[in-house]
Every structure is written in structure tokens, then in C-alpha cells.
Amino acid sequence: MRKVIAALLLTALALAPLAAQPKVSEKQEVAIFAMGYYGWNIPREALGSIDLEIQKVFLDLGRFTVMGYTQRFTSTDVQSFVDILKKAKETNFVLPEKYQFGEAFLTAAEFEKLLGAFQVAIPVVVSFDSQYDSKDNRWETNIKTSISFVDAGTGTLTGIADVQTSGTDKSSQLASIQSAIGSIPMELQYKIRSIPAFTLNTRVLAASGKEIKLQLGTNMGIKKGDEYSIIVASQVAGFQDEREQGLVLIKDVGPEVSTGLVLYSSAKPGPDTQLREIPRRGVDAAPYIHFAQGSLLRVIGDPVQPESEAEGSNILLGLRMPLSRGFFDVRPYAAIQVPVNGIRSILSFVFVPVNVLLGAEYNLYLGRLAVTPYAGIGTSFVYITEAFSGSTYDTSDMLFPHFGAQAYLNVSYLFNRNTKLFVEAGFEYWLALTSLYSNYGGVSFGGGVSWKL
């Protein structure tokens, strides 16, 4: 009896480490069909190389081995395909010489090859609308594409990625359609990474202070700026309870090992700590308000703001969007802002000056706290709306009233993995390029909130 008990204890001790082993993702094989658009009047010349672009999305993600197929499904054929995959696992199932799913024809050899893949991806256009908007004087196209992922081994639906894109063009419907189709790959990559079966899981290899080494690198598509949750698991009444206990930011990526910076964690990460990818689009959205103390933006000859009142506070409402995926400490950004005191109305027309900027920022991460100096240059245009008709006029192609520059010091605090608040101070100045407006700018301060998208 003692020997039996000892053997059971030894077995339990041997199995315990195995049960606690973290998950580490491996490459999956995926078979991708061409995008189906049966029933929708989409010009073939607008489709271009969309099938190759979709395949390229999977290749760029790094976590898939890709097989491409030229057949196209219709939206009503997906379920039929899933049903056939399930029947193929039955012992008495006989493969016919050819399958037909709407527009898609598959030979027995092609079908058997599909059964060897881990996943099958079927992109289909489920909604298409392209028409001329007489109010805004432009062509507008909206497309909804649904990509169904099917586990070839079980015939079960792994997930669905719905991608909605739009495109506009002032002169050509074809150009607006091409713009909408061309936006599919960018959004698709984020959608795929958001499906749990394709979200990366990895583990800590070594930890030193706030820096960790983690398994996986460019071999699985990890990039600088990616974020991972620190996962702590426990057993509760026989159920697995997984909770996020921290956040890791990837600062460097090697072929098979990456380096991460722990921004915060309630549990000290060590070897074999579970990490899970946080899918993001790769851009932050930071709306802000600035108060620039100095010369006001004036319309020349405006009685509302005569020369004697040229000094004061400019209120600037803006949105700054730094790129995060692919970058760590130095990140490029784009910003758009409106100097509120420059808005004017004449009869039923409203004139809104808009500043557009490009620049770069440097991030010094101190845990949840970050210190970020940034600077940029830009130009502006006047946006015109008509109150009664609701028509809008974009004059960016014919009127650039200002050229300007900005430099700020930003201090932010990360409240949770998605949101941080910030304050900032600096200087910006805008030089008038037309006699309609004056120069303006000066010392500026403000703040806002930033969301990771």
C-alpha cells in the first residue's frame, strides 16, 4: 500500500509542472479562398489584386503558413462547406470527383488537401453600396466583407472577421470603390489578431528588473510597440480562472526572442509566466485642448477683433494620433486642430480654419508614468459649411492660410491598459501665408486623454 501511495504521489508531482506549463503559440496552416462577390455589381477593374493583398495580410502576420485558392464562395455557400467538412470525417463518407459551392468548384484532390490545413479562410462581400452624394458632391462607397474561419479538422467555425471599409472620390466612382477595397487589408489584420484562436500566447524566458525576455519574435510576427498582458491562472472549484495582472510593451524583437518592458504588474513576472497578445490597430487617439498665450488669430479687417485686441488666448481643439505598432521610444504622429477664435460666419456660411501637422515624439517610460517631448510642422486650410443646405466645401486644394510649427513636453499617466491622461506645455506659432489672416501663437499649455486603438 505504501508503495502504491508513493507511486501516486510521484506521479502527481511529475504531472503538476506539466499542468502549469504556459501556452506558446505555433504557426498554423491556413487555406485562403479568393474574395467572393457574387450578386454584387463590383467592377472587376476595381478589385485589382485584392486576393493577393488578403493573402499578404496572413503572410505579414507571421503566424500562418499560407495556401492560396482561386475559387470564390458566395455568402450562402459557407455553411454548406462547413457541413461537408463535418461529413468528411465520417467513416462511410465517399469523396465525389468534384464539389460545387455556388461559384466555387473543388476537385477531390483539392478537397483532400484542404482537410490537411489547420484553418480555412473564406472572404465574402456581404454588403456593397456605391452612389453619388449630391450634398457633399462626391462618390461614396461602403463595403462590408466577412471572413469566415473554419477548422478543417473538425468542421467547426473558428471565428468570423467582419471588415467594414469606405472610400470617397470627388470625380470617379471607380476610384471610390478602389479606395474602399484597398482599405480591407489594413483592417483585416487587426480583426484576425482579435480572434482568440489566432491571438498569440507566449511565456517569459527570463526577467531582470522591469525588463523581460519572452519566447517568440519575428518568426511569429511580433513587432515593436506590441503589448502583452501578464496572465495569472488559478484553479477555482475545478475551473481555470485566468486574470490579467500586468502590461508588457515590446521594445525589441529578435528572430525567436523578444524584449519587453513591464509597464505595471501586480504579480512579479518570472520564467514561464504566461503572456497574451493584446490586439491593437497600431495607433493612439489623443484628443486635447490647448490654450496658447500670445497673438490671436485674426481675420484682417474684422471689427470683432480689432488690432488693439490682437493679444490674448488662442483656444486650440485638436486630435493627435501617434503610430504605435512597429515603434517603441521614437514614434511618428499626425495631428489635426482647430483654432476656435478663427472661426467666422458670413451670412449662412461658416469658415473653419484647420491645422494639419506631422511630427515625431520620444517616449521615456517610467512605469505607468511617461514623459514625452514631441515636435511637428504643418499647414492649414479653411473648411466651409453652408447652414441651410448643409453642404460642405473642402478648400485644402486652393487655400493654405498658415504654415506653423509646435514643440511640447507631454507627461502622461496610464490608468489602465487602454487609457491614459496627460498634461503638456510648450510653444507653437503659425505664420500667415495670405492677407486674410494674421500670424498667431505663443506659449501654450493644455491636456487631454489618450486611447490605444
Image (cartoon, rainbow, N blue to C red):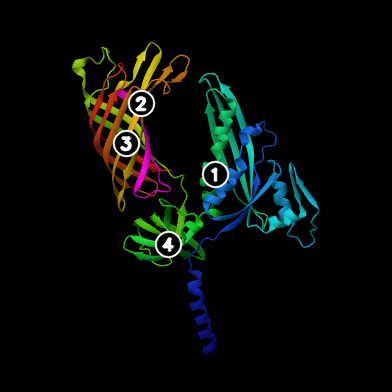
Residue beneath disc 2: 380
- First in sequence, mark 2 or 4: give its number: 4
Contact (Cβ within 8 Å) of mark 2 with mark 4: no
Give the number of the mark in front: 1 or 2: 2
Q: Is residue 384 visible?
A: yes
| Residue 146 appears left or right of 380 | right
Q: Is residue 200 visible?
A: no
Please tell me how crowded label 2 is: few (under 14), some (14-19), or many (20+) other residues with Cα within 10 Å.
many
Contact (Cβ within 8 Å) of mark 3 with mark 2: no
Amino acid identity at mark 3: Gly
In which quadrant will I find the C terminus?
Answer: top left
- First in sequence, mark 1 or 3: give its number: 1
Q: CA distance from mark 2 to mark 4?
A: 45 Å
| Residue 220 appears left or right of 98 | left
> What residue is rendered at 77% in x and 46% in y?
100
Please tell me how crowded label 3 is: few (under 14), some (14-19), or many (20+) other residues with Cα within 10 Å.
many
> What residue is rendered at 58% in x and 31% in y?
177
Amino acid identity at mark 1: Leu
Contact (Cβ within 8 Å) of mark 4 with mark 1: no
Q: CA distance from mark 3 to mark 2?
A: 13 Å
Residue beneath disc 3: 376
**Which residues fall within the magenta stretch?**
321-340
